[in-house]
Image (spheres, grey):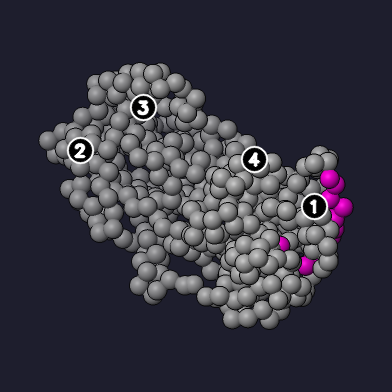
Amino acid sequence: MRSLSIGCLALGLLTLAWAGHLPAQENNTAPKGFMALFNGKDLSNWHGEETMDPRKFKQMSEADLQAKRKADQDNALKHWRVDANGDLVNDGDGAYLTTDKEFGDIEFYIDWKMVPKGDSGIYLRATPQIQIWDFTDPQKFSLGANKGSGGLWNNTAGNPGKDPLVLADKKLGEWNRFHIIQVGDKTTIRLNDKLIVDKAPLENYWDRKLPLFPRGSIQLQTHGGEMRWKNIFLREIPAEEANQLLRGKDPEGFVSLFNGKDLTGWAGAVDNYQVEEAAIMCKPGKGGALHTKDEYQDFIVRVEFQLPAAGNNGLAIRYPGQGDPAYAGMCELQVLDTEHPNYKSLDPRQAHGSAYGMAAAHRGYLRPVGEWNYEQVTVKGSSIKVELNGVTILDTDLSKITEYMANTPHPGKDRKSGFFGFAGHGDPVKFRNISLKKL
């Protein structure tokens, strides 16, 4: 705005979790590190909910909301039960069973069993859905049932994840097990230990112009045939692990821009920055543009950053080496504690991830102050794409921008090359694990 490391043990556990080898236990007893969402006895931790766009709940009056919740709960209790074996059973009708708690990044196990011609699903962040159906039912082959369960069925046709990679369902009448990892909008699913969805973005069914919601409930769909569920275990993935899962190992072609020790390879306002705990930090009360010595045209840059309360900095894109990066360069991508009260009157084009003064990014995807965030920026021609913590928050073509904040034009927005850097504004914002790939 204008005016690594993980220990060997933790990394090993992370790798096992991503590969799907941590065992989910039986008898509704959670494995170490997980919580049991279903206790095998009653519907504690769950409520009934006739599904709808979750944003509408926030628009309802308190009286209307309570009336809807009571009606949905009464409906659910007619169709959901726990049997003597500790199975959660739905008769194929009624309100969806919905977690009382909302979740963001998660690792999740759930076992399920269905009857012939069954059809069901699992909503993540209150959004449809991981598909479950009878893969032998020829009446639904045209919809993809013969490809098996586990696809993100409500994704747009042809997009990743809509269909499972392989058919992994067991015979009807046998128990199946999902292992699901949701980080940002990226969904990875294993069915019966087979990878069927690999880091595919789950689309926002309720409004495809928007990213997937940052948090939301898990819902079990009712869809016309008896479904049984058990062994429902979940753990919330902490920020450091989520960043590692999203980033993985930088692919071939990425080059580190920062050695973690000093500012070798950097130019500009070097006296106004310092290296602290293997991170580049703007000195408090200082600022200016710290930039690479090399220039770039099209590229992908990966960076982790940590914001202090009300922290303010920016990513300088195709910066010429002098002047204000937001105007002289192609743009300044905001790095800002957007939700701090200091910024309650922000123009949307000033929010974190925005191309300052030109294009507004979606809000709500920053981690809490003090946690590290992971961001990937793709610059190609006049287009810029910003992915924050696994969610695309900006995807814009600056050549099409004709309206500017405060009617102040940005003469550098059409630059074809320049330096990459940081646009400090006096706050101790930190950056680490900075790598770039030329396109």
Q: Residue furthest front?
A: 285
Q: Residue furthest left?
A: 84
Q: Position of residue 231 (x, y in %)?
A: 25, 46
SS at circle 3: strand
Residue linked to disc 2: 87
Q: Which mark is residue 382?
A: 1
Residue linked to disc 4: 345
Q: Position of residue 34 (x, y in %)?
A: 29, 54
Q: Gap in Å between the C-alphas at discs 4 and 1?
A: 29 Å
Apparent side of residue 113 relative to residue 68 in the rendered image (left or right): left
Decide which of tag 2 and tag 4 comes sooner along the chain. 2
Q: Gap in Å between the C-alphas at discs 3 and 2?
A: 20 Å
Indicate which label's residue lies in the foreground, 2 or 1: 1
Asked if residue 153 is positioned above or below residue 164 in the image, the reply reads above
Residue linked to disc 3: 49
What are the residue bounds of the magenta stretch? 408-423
Instruction: State yes or no: residue 315 in magenta.
Output: no
**What kind of residue is marked 2?**
Asp
Q: Main secondary structure of the magenta part?
A: loop
Callout 3 crowding tier (Cα within 10 Å): few <14, some 14–19, many ≥20: many
**What kind of residue is marked 1?**
Ser
Decide which of tag 3 and tag 2 comes sooner along the chain. 3
- Residue 78, quarter of the rendered image: top left
SS at circle 1: loop
Indicate which label's residue lies in the foreground, 4 or 1: 4
